[in-house]
Amino acid sequence: MFKPYYLDKTPSSATMDRIKARYPLNQAQKKIIKRYEKQPPGELAHIDITKIPKDIRCSSKVKERYVAACCDDCTRVTYAEIIKDRRASTLTYFMARSLSWFKQIYNFEFEAVMSDNGPEFIPIHLSLRKT
């Protein structure tokens, strides 16, 4: 079915099954999807980090750089910085600056912060317990 459109870039059948499972096709299943969008500003913040690709860095001599961002769930207002590494200590200071910025500019005090399960977001006491 997809071959005429995608030619040799056609997704595998396993990939298509995962996509169908993630995004149900009928309306009854779409209503079951649970959303976590918060209504009042400052109720939930999202934090994440991504690497800046080599082709858009200012200089080839610069080592890896990352963009860290903190976003309010309701308003989607985002604070972002370029940081030098992914260490938890670097992100702790980034988080302090971002929360201070939200408080000073928009008077938001977040009730919760949500992140993915990246190693930089795992608390030290949890990582020590695994060893």
Image (spheres, rainbow, N blue to C red):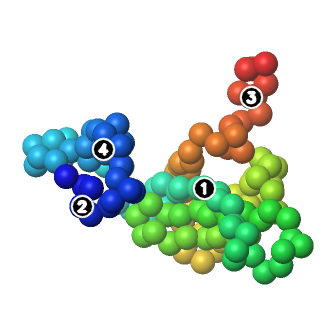
Q: Residue at x 73, y 20 (%)?
A: 130
Q: Residue at x 19, y 52 (%)?
A: 1
Labelled pair 1, 3 in contact (Cβ < 8 Å): no
Residue bearing mark 2:
4
Whether residue 128 is situated above or below residue 105 in the rendered picture: above
Q: Nearer the viewer, mark 4 or mark 2?
A: 2
- Tag 1 or tag 2, which sits nearer the N-term? 2
- The three-letter code of the residue at mark 2 reads Pro
Q: Are marks 2 and 1 in contact (CB under 8 Å)?
A: no
Q: Nearer the viewer, residue 109 or 56?
A: 56
Answer with the quarter of the image where residue 34 lies.
top left
Residue tagged 1? 48
Picture coordinates of residue 109, whole percent (x, y): 56, 60
Q: Which residue is mark 4?
A: 16
Residue 26 placement, left or right of 14:
left
> In the drawing, what numbered circle is on residue 127?
3
SS class of the residue under badge 1? Answer: strand
Image spot of residue 7 (x, y percent)? 33, 59
Image check: 54 left or right of 26?
A: right
Q: Between disc 1 and disc 3, whose residue precedes?
A: 1
Q: Amino acid at mark 1?
A: Asp
Query: Mark 2 or mark 1: which is in front?
Result: 2
Q: Residues within 10 Å of mark 4 (few under 14, many from 20)?
A: few
